[in-house]
Amino acid sequence: MSALVAVPRRVMALVALLATAACDGPADPVGAPTTGATTSSVAATAPTASVGPVYRAQDLDLCKRTDLRPLADLSLTVARTDPKPPLGRPGVACLFEMRTKDGHEANLRVEASTPASAEEARSLYRSTERVTVMTPAGAIPGVGDEAEAFTKRSEPGFKYAEYMVHARTDNLVVKVWFAVGGASYAGTEMLASKALTFLRATQAAVPIG
């Protein structure tokens, strides 16, 4: 009887051993990725988006940096300057309040904004057309990734002609508004030429990084 009892005990031990091995499961195949290895591999090979130059205008003093000599032929006198920056976005600006030789109002505002990305700059650029009360005057080639002009004429007791141009290059948006009052309207071509001169100069002045 004791021999008959010993055999089942050995069988039970063997069954227990096999059960333990089954719970551990088979080994991973050679080369099979683990969770950690997969994460590391993805992180190492993930593509990065290509970006252009990143402009930074915040340290620029446009009141000092803007050269007003292109306006010399108009005999304008600067009454005051206002360096108030663009509202709600990183950037700088300067408003030059001027007077013509016969005492009429004239204004020049130069503005440079540098949002964190080109996409944000594109959104800022496109918002101008939605909010301005000026009339679109068409696209301007050769001054950035995209550029457009606007005009307006009014009579606040005198003839007041306005011209605005803005342009985007990567994350840089530059806007120039030039307006001159007088007994008659200032010519649009003259206003456009002056505004574009200041636009290009401001674009060149904003540093990268």
Image (cartoon, rainbow, N blue to C red):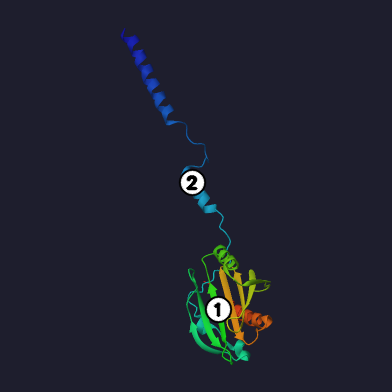
Q: Quadrant of residue 11?
A: top left
* Identity, as a three-letter code, of the amino acid under mark 1: Val
- Pointer 1 local density, CA inside 10 Å: few below 14, some 14–19, many at least 20: many
Q: Secondary structure at mark 2?
A: helix
Front-most of 195 and 91? Answer: 195
Q: Quadrant of residue 123?
A: bottom right
Front-most of 198 and 99? Answer: 99
Q: Quadrant of residue 177?
A: bottom right
Q: Secondary structure at mark 1?
A: strand
Q: Residue at x 64, y 75 (%)?
A: 151
- Pointer 2 local density, CA inside 10 Å: few below 14, some 14–19, many at least 20: few
Q: Position of residue 149 (x, y in %)?
A: 64, 73
Q: Residue at x 58, y 74 (%)?
A: 175
Front-most of 65 and 188? Answer: 188
Per the image, the residue denoted by label 1 is 110
Q: Position of residue 163 (x, y in %)?
A: 62, 78
Per the image, the residue denoted by label 2 is 37
Q: Residue at x 41, y 24 (%)?
A: 19
Q: CB under 8 Å between callouts 2 and 1?
A: no
- Comes first in the chain, label 2 or label 1: 2
- Asked if residue 39 lies left or right of residue 173, the reply is left
Residue 206 visible in the snapshot: no
